Every structure is written in C-alpha cells, then in structure tokens.
Image (spheres, helix red, strand yellow):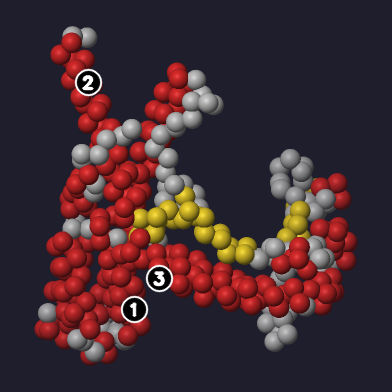
Amino acid sequence: MTNVAAEQQRQESRHGLAQDAARRRAMEESVILLAPSFGWYRGQYQLPASKTVVEIAGKGIDKKSVTTPRSKLMTDTYPRDSALMPWKKRLQKIESRQKALIEKYSVPFPIRGVRIVPKAAANAFFRELDDVKRDLQTAADEFVRDLDDIVKQMKDNTNEDVYKAVESKIPKRRDEMRAKFYIDVVPVEIAGRVDNPDVLTQSDLQQHHEAVREACQRKVEEAVETMIEQPRQQLADALAGLKDVINRSGRVSTKSFRPVYEAMSKLRSFSFVANEPLLAEINTLERRMRGTVPSTLDQVSAANSGFTAALSTLMEEVDDAEKQAEDMEEFGREHRAIQLD
C-alpha cells in the first residue's frame, strides 16, 4: 500500500469514528434507554419430570420431545380478592396499563427489553408510571394481607396431586410473597469504549475496543432507524384506519380520531428525527381535526371540506421513504466535530 493510500485510509477511518461518535452523542442528548419490568405472583411451577407423564391419544411421549408441564395456581376464576374479582385478571389489568404506557412513550431499542424514551417525554412517562406503580402496590399489599385465604383458594381449586407437587414452592412468608410484586425501570447506557487496562492487556484492549465500538454503532444505527420508522408507521396505520371509516361512510366519532391524536403525539416526541414538512403537515391536519365535529364526516363532506385532501397529504408525507432515508442521514450531523476517544 502506498503512503498516499495509507493516509487516505487513516483519514477515512478517523472520519468514520467521528461520525459514529456524533450519532451516539446525538442519541444521548435526545433520548434515554430504559429497561422496564413488571413482576407479580403468577403461581406457575414446573412439575417434577419424574412424576409426570405426557400423552397424546393415550400414548406416552418421550420427555426429550416435550417440555415438562407447569402448574397454574393463579387461574381466570380463582383465587379471588375480597370483591370476588379473580386476582389473575386484576393483576393482568394493571400490567396491561404498564405495557400500554411503554408503547405510548417509547419505541424498542434493538436489545430485548430495552426501550427508547425521548427525554422530552420522560417526565410524563414517569409520572404516569407512578400511578400504575401505586395501583400495583395497593393490590400487592392486599394480596399479602389475604395470603392465607389466597393459598387456601389455590389449594381448593387445584388438582390435589398437582398442588402437592408444588406446594413447597409457594411463598408462605408475607415478605417473601411481597417481593414478587414490583415495577422497575433500569437505565441502560451505551458503552462506546473499553478502558480498563488493569483487566485487559493493551493488545486485548484494542481488540475489544473495536468489537464493542462496532457493536454499539450497529445498535445505534438500528435504534435511529426504529425511532424514524415506528412512530411514522403508527401514524400511517391510524390515518389509514380513519380514512377507511370515512370512505365507508361509517360512523365517525371522537373515538375514531383518538388513535390519530395519539400517534401524532408520539411522533412529535420523536421530532428530533422528523423533518419539518412532516411536522407541518401533522399540525395542519390536527388543526382541521380539532375544528371538525367527527359525526359530520362522511365521504362526501370530507372531500368537500378539504379534510380528505389534508389526510391524504399527510399520509403521503408519512410514507415518503426518501425523506425517511434523509432523516436517517441527517440525525447527528450537527455533531460532526466530536471525536471518539
């Protein structure tokens, strides 16, 4: 390799590192990465393989071919709380609120369980999460208070042999059972470098630095792509749904508008990866929606009033693949001067 070619390669490498650092820095300034989790007592335990027989059409199945069955002590009917509501349904309802909240404020990061939350929406996210957490705490305290009765209900409504096989695994102490209920949100940080020479040799350090940097950069690229694509897709689906109701001259209602409003709000929270024409068209349609009585809309009135045109224009803007690619390219560009250590 000539000196000129080698120098060009070094310059390209430095430029690539700078771009990587710029994009990561832009992400750090705009979003936080969180790993939310939700825990409640589910009453499911693996049955002892030595005491379990799995059959199909009366024939035993080799246990290497199937998983060992599990007990279900918490069912859709029992145990019940003091108001006779099944505990499983009550706790699932709270968990559904937590999942809906996560969907409302975030998109997935390309590592399982990690979510991308815009910093601009973080306070609202945690505020609403605290409401869900209080409801879970109330339910958990009641569950633990009535633990003796709940255990008795599980015993009375479970096959006797199944119950005996798993009885010893049921938390009997209240503090032990209480620990099964929680809502956690763990912050996650993208590490762009490895710099602990006390653990690694210098040659290992360089090798692992490159591996970590490349892996992190891939995840950042995937995350930016998700931040651009998912909120747009949610809005596209909501707009298509509204247009379909109007075109079928169906019954347009406030409920018909809600998914569009929610999708607009989510996309705005990710406005740092959205272009100005898209945000402007969102504002235009939203103003028109707020000035429209939903029940007055049908295919003819929507066309005559310009509502259909505004809807179609936004749909085209949301689906514009070229502009999505441009937004992807632009993200982090203002940080080109930042260098990777």
> Mark 2, residues whose alpha carbon is within 10 Å: few (<14), some, or many (≥20)?
few
Q: Amino acid at mark 2?
A: Gln
Q: Secondary structure at mark 2?
A: helix
> Mark 1, residues whose alpha carbon is within 10 Å: few (<14), some, or many (≥20)?
few
Q: Nearer the viewer, mark 1 or mark 3?
A: 3
On the question of residue 319 being in view, the answer is no
Q: Where is residue 99 drawn, in percent x and y?
A: 50, 66
Q: Amino acid at mark 3?
A: Ala
Q: Nearer the viewer, residue 153 or 313?
A: 153
| Residue, disc 1 | 258
Reading the chain from its start, which is encountered first: label 3 or label 2?
2
On the question of residue 324 being in view, the answer is yes
> Mark 3, residues whose alpha carbon is within 10 Å: few (<14), some, or many (≥20)?
few
Q: Is residue 40 above or below residue 258?
A: above
The quadrant where residue 292 appears: bottom left
State yes or no: discs 1 and 3 in contact (Cβ < 8 Å): no
| Residue, disc 3 | 124
Q: Amino acid at mark 1?
A: Arg
Q: Looking at the image, which residue is at 77% across and 78% down?
A: 146
Q: Nearer the viewer, residue 128 or 232?
A: 128
Q: Nearer the viewer, residue 63 or 279?
A: 279
Q: Where is residue 329 drawn, in percent x and y?
A: 21, 45
Q: Nearer the viewer, mark 3 or mark 2?
A: 3
Q: Is residue 316 above or below residue 130?
A: above
How far apart in space, not on screen, are marks 3 and 2 (Cα)? 47 Å
Count of residue discs: 3
The quadrant where residue 4 appears: top left
| Residue, disc 2 | 9
Q: Secondary structure at mark 3?
A: helix
Q: Looking at the image, which residue is at 45% across and 20% down?
A: 202
